Amino acid sequence: MRIAVPAETQGAETRVAATPETVRKFIGLGAEVVVEKGAGTTSGISDAEYEAAGAKIAASAAEAVAGAEIVLKVRRPAEAEINGLPAGALVVGIMDPYGSEAQVEALAKANVAAFAMEFMPRITRAQVMDVLSSQANLAGYRAVVDAAAEYGRALPMMMTAAGTVPAAKIFIMGVGVAGLQAIATARRMGAIVTATDVRPATKEQVESLGAKFLAVEDEEFKQAQTAGGYAKEMSKEYQAKQAELTASHIAKQDIVITTALIPGRPAPKLISAAMVESMKAGSVIVDLAVERGGNCELAKPGETVMTANGVKIVGHLNVPGRLPATSSSLYAKNLFAFVETLIDKKERKLAVNWEDELVKATCLTKDGAVIHPNFAPKA
């Protein structure tokens, strides 16, 4: 059983899909692990560390994946990579299939079984495999660190002989995993924190972290969560009421961090240009949804925008990748936990149970076809 770990080629990806720790665990299951030369460099992992863990180092991606039964990736393979994948191999990574149907079809034509880790069901058994949570957790933390760096003032209240420094006011919009970590980090750094979300269950979570909850708590709000724990898309009427409530609040904030995403849909617009104009000079907005169109109307992917009234809008791409060593460590453990379920430990070989609920939830392509119900051709 051969497992390949090629280097990432899409964008400025700094993460890697395996660490020396998970390499040792895969070898313990009977696998041969081949890592492309330099694959872990941007995550602070040298080829020598992989070799010490028992991996073989391949000079190229083609050499790494040749004959592999499993290919581990952070991002979906690029077109050039797809052409070199071994037929029948399992390709496991973050596939980002929405809006990328042609790329998903290309994976099917390459006759590989592509698994989208972001589709892992949120059940107890799969918690250790939840890449969305592990990466969003780090994104929420990093968003506060980035905001503090851009803000140019202290976050906690300070009583000094020269006078009192007031605590910064931070508003978190969207209280998923990233939002909760942002709240916790901002509170630890001494800020006054408020937060909002359309899901009723988040109110208690926000308050348990010492922040104040802000939302229009009407009947629609009480029904605003899916069975899977995700936010529903709200009506235009609700969005208008929520916008009215938050507009006056945003004007008083020093830092706003937005994290709102709905799977498979563009990011909801939460901060209008008018709201940005109402903010004080020196205020900071960090938009964690910028890769999906952004929660802030004026955010630009990969850029920090300075508005005419002196507000900075931070739109970093791949925020977990700004902490590559930590994000790679957690992501690699997520992958190992899932791949381990695909291996027969007694026979020490690949043995996929295609009826397993985890496999059915994450498998995009198999036997030359797109099989996931969200993307398969309609009958």
Image (cartoon, rainbow, N blue to C red):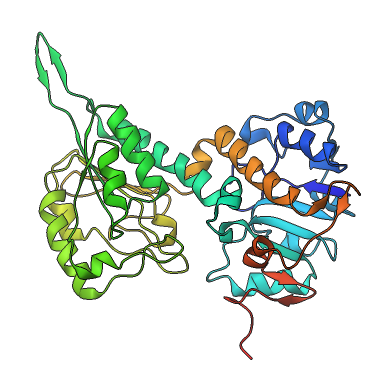
Residue 374: x, y in percent?
Answer: 57, 75
Answer above or below: position of 95 versus 133: below
Q: Please tell me which residue is depicted at 36% across the width and 59% down the height of the picture.
A: 294
Q: Nearer the viewer, residue 202 or 17?
A: 202
Answer above or below: position of 250 versus 297: above
Most extreme residue toward the top is 161
Examine the rendering and report whether any part of residue 285 can be seen.
no
Is 89 placed left or right of 292 in the picture?
Answer: right
Q: Nearer the viewer, residue 125 or 168?
A: 125
Residue 20: x, y in percent?
Answer: 73, 32
Is 348 placed left or right of 8 in the picture?
Answer: right
Q: Please tell me which residue is depicted at 19% across the width and 74% down the height of the picture.
A: 237
Is 159 placed left or right of 199 in the picture?
Answer: left
Residue 297: x, y in percent?
Answer: 28, 61
Q: How many marks?
A: 0
Give the quadrant of residue 164. top left
Residue 280: x, y in percent?
Answer: 13, 43
Q: Quadrant of the C terminus?
A: bottom right
Q: Please tell me which residue is depicted at 31% across the width and 59% down the height of the picture.
A: 199
Examine the rendering and report whether any part of residue 20 can be seen.
yes
Q: Nearer the viewer, residue 343 or 174?
A: 343
Answer above or below: position of 224 versus 7: below
